[in-house]
Image (cartoon, rainbow, N blue to C red):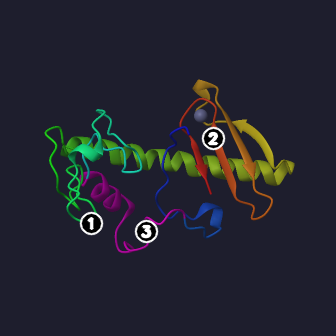
Amino acid sequence: MKELWIVPLAIDIAGQGKQMGDFKKNNDMKTVEEQLTEQISGRCIHFTGIANNTCELGISYKDVRDETQRPYKFPCLKRHHGGDCSNAQFPTKEDLKREVDEIIENQKKTVNAMVMVKEHIAKTGEKIGSIECPCSEREGRLEYSMAEINGHVRSSCTTCKMGWIE
Ligand SMILES: [Zn+2]
């Protein structure tokens, strides 16, 4: 599946009171920026998530993690830290700020696009369709479909990383 911009925070989309993701569950006192900073600073810049087999450098998590403990410890993570990887590298302050700013910017764009799609559906009644993606310099189409059963919308752009699953 194509990589999409993540929308990891609670956003009230068009006043619907929808909570997106589970990011905020235990962190109600923290701002989105603080949560993101904490999350990103705690992992190696090459980390791709343990759902994958290897990191961006092609190093197998199996080869570097500590399996003597459960849950496994990873050299890529500050929490659950263990094992050994000579390439582990945590983000600098500058990296961190750049990445957090980028994610927040992408989230704003994504929320705007969600509103655009929902308005389009409300106006046209088309439950499957596409609109021009806000990344218009790339001439992307934001293709969407709305689930009959609960009205949730999923969408992804034909050219950029814009997209979400409700
Ligand atoms: Zn796009």
Name the element at disc 3: loop
Residue 68 percent location from the top left of the image: 20, 61
Badge number at residue 24: 3
Query: Disc 2, disc 1: CB below 8 Å?
Result: no
Which residue is pictured at 29% across the width and 55% down the height? 37
Q: Are marks 1 and 3 in contact (CB under 8 Å)?
A: no
Closer to the camera: disc 2 or disc 1?
1
The outermost residue toward the right is 125
In this view, 46 is above or below 25: above
* Magenta run includes residue 119: no
Q: Which mark is residue 155?
A: none
At 40% from the left edge and 45% from the top edge, which residue is drawn? 52
Is-magenta flag for residue 36? Answer: yes
Q: What crowding class fits label 2: few (fewer than 14 Cα within 10 Å), some (14-19), or many (20 or more)? A: many
Of residues 24 and 82, the one drawn nearer to the viewer in this rendering: 82
Residue placed most toward the observer, 39 or 114: 39
Specify the amino acid type for callout 1.
Arg
Say what amino acid the circle numbered 3 marks: Lys
Amino acid type, residue under disc 2 in the picture: Ser
Q: Is mark 1 within 8 Å of ligand 1?
A: no
Q: Which residue is mark 1?
A: 70
* Residue 107 shown left or right of residue 143 in the figure: left
Q: Quadrant of residue 81?
A: bottom left
Question: Residue 118: x, y in percent?
Answer: 72, 53
Label 2–label 3 contact, CB within 8 A: no
What whole-number distance in Å separates the C-alpha atoms at marks 2 and 1? 37 Å
Instruction: Tell me if 84 is positioned left or right of 10 in this view.
Output: left
Query: Secondary structure under badge 1?
Result: loop
Q: Marks 2 and 3, Cα distance to the nearest angstrom?
A: 24 Å
* Quadrant location of the N terminus in the rendered image: top right
The residue positioned 80% from the left and 45% from the top of the image is 128
Magenta range:
20-42
